Amino acid sequence: MASTTTPPSPGKRHLAVLALGSVILSVDGYDLFTVGTIGPSLLHDRSWGATPSTLGTLGSVTALGMPFGSILAGWAADRWGRRLPLTIVMVWISAAMLAAALAPDLTALGLARFCTGIGIGALAPLVGAAVSDGAPPRRRTLHLAIAMGSIGIGGTVSALLGRILLSHVHFQTLFLIGALAVVLAPVIWWVFPAGQPHRDDEPRRVPARELFTADRRGPTLLFWVATFASMALVYSTTAWLPTVLVRNGYSLNSSLEFTIVFTIGASAGGLLMAVPSDRGHLKGATVFTFGLAAAALLALSSKQPHPVLLVVSAMAGLGSLGCQNMIISYMARYYPPRLRGTALGLGLGVGRLGSIVGPTYLSIATSLNDSPRAGFVAFVVPALLGVIVVSFLPATRGRPEQSAPPAVAPIAVEPL
């Protein structure tokens, strides 16, 4: 009986944190992908008065709340540890999904999605910091890839449920299912360690200006731009991919099928990219994911045999969601533990501007150009921006934790 009432032992806690963190981020992915999943059904239901631009607006409203969540969560994580903020956020995001399920009109739905966005924005820096804290040094990217890859699993669940349920139930049922995540709140309190996780690091209150010391200023700004590009790509594809596929002549079921493969590719590909990343090639892996996204999304715009399109969809998922995961891993490895929560929170907070711009940008691009290929071509732009920016970031070498960065290369990875 004791095993059911006491937290995991210290030796196994990092595995428990990794497992629970993965579940939490699958909730993040489910909530993130739901707007894209229900998009065609929302447009088909004339009682809501939705137009194609409505999807872009809902995506942008969701994204508008994310910077607030990211920045506040990063600050709270370095002040109070990971457990308390995560517990609060899980209750918050479940309540927001319930509000979306009960929304009577588009205005109420938009407000609920804004609140959902605050929760989504908070989850990645909190879970990323917690998983990175306990991961073995030479497996940090792998652990983060497993956790962040769960975002794709949540998206897969959303698309699968959409394919199974949307022809039989109202689209708001998918939001109601998302509200069930509240049951994770007590589990988080039980599994995650309490208090500040790095008590030997001073000062405990980390000022944001430490991200802009002479040796960190350039990489910090580059990380922010790269995160902006990754978020613009991720949130434009998740909000618009099913609709863009339907515009290209595919049925709703086919578009959801492609979305399922897209998210599976993202999850599996993240694990694949972790292997070279943990062997000192994190920069190359990150550039590769951005480039792969550009090539695969462009390839989706042309008519090809169905099996080929499924493979290309998986590659597009690997690149589109994989680039976000790689950037998060990159930041977690670059900054020391006492700065990690703040760095992830601020980096993702600023980068979330891309999640606001992305869906609106796709909405405008598809409205101004009648070509079915317009949406796919528009997807490529942020991917290419990411390739350019990441190429200027300092390369990581995967040195042991106890090694100090050489004096001649002050922007190399610091000991974690």
Image (tube, grey):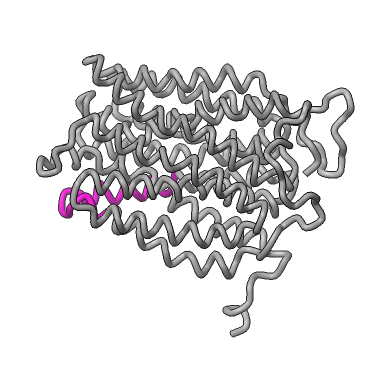
**Would you place residue 170 above or below residue 368 in this image?**
below
Q: Is residue 212 left or right of residue 166?
A: right
Q: Which residues are magenta?
A: 152-173
Q: Is residue 45 visible?
A: yes
**Would you place residue 388 above or below residue 239 in this image?**
above
Q: Is residue 314 visible?
A: no
Front residue (pair 50, 331):
50
Numbered circles on residues, count? 0
Residue 328: image quadrant is: top right
Residue with the most extreme bottom position: 1
Which residue is depicted at the point 64% across and 46% down? 341
Residue with the most extreme right position: 407
Q: Find residue 92 and report its horizontal and vertical position in percent.
A: 43, 58
State yes or no: residue 232 in magenta: no
Residue 281: image quadrant is: top right
Q: Is residue 194 left or right of residue 126?
A: right
Q: Quadrant of the C terminus?
A: top right
Q: Is residue 172 left or right of residue 225?
A: left
Q: Find residue 21 and report its horizontal and vertical position in percent.
A: 55, 55
Q: Find residue 262 and report its horizontal and vertical position in percent.
A: 39, 36
State yes or no: residue 167 in magenta: yes
Front residue (pair 306, 378):
378
Which residue is depicted at the point 19% across and 34% down? 251
The overriding secondary structure of the stretch rendered in magenta is: helix
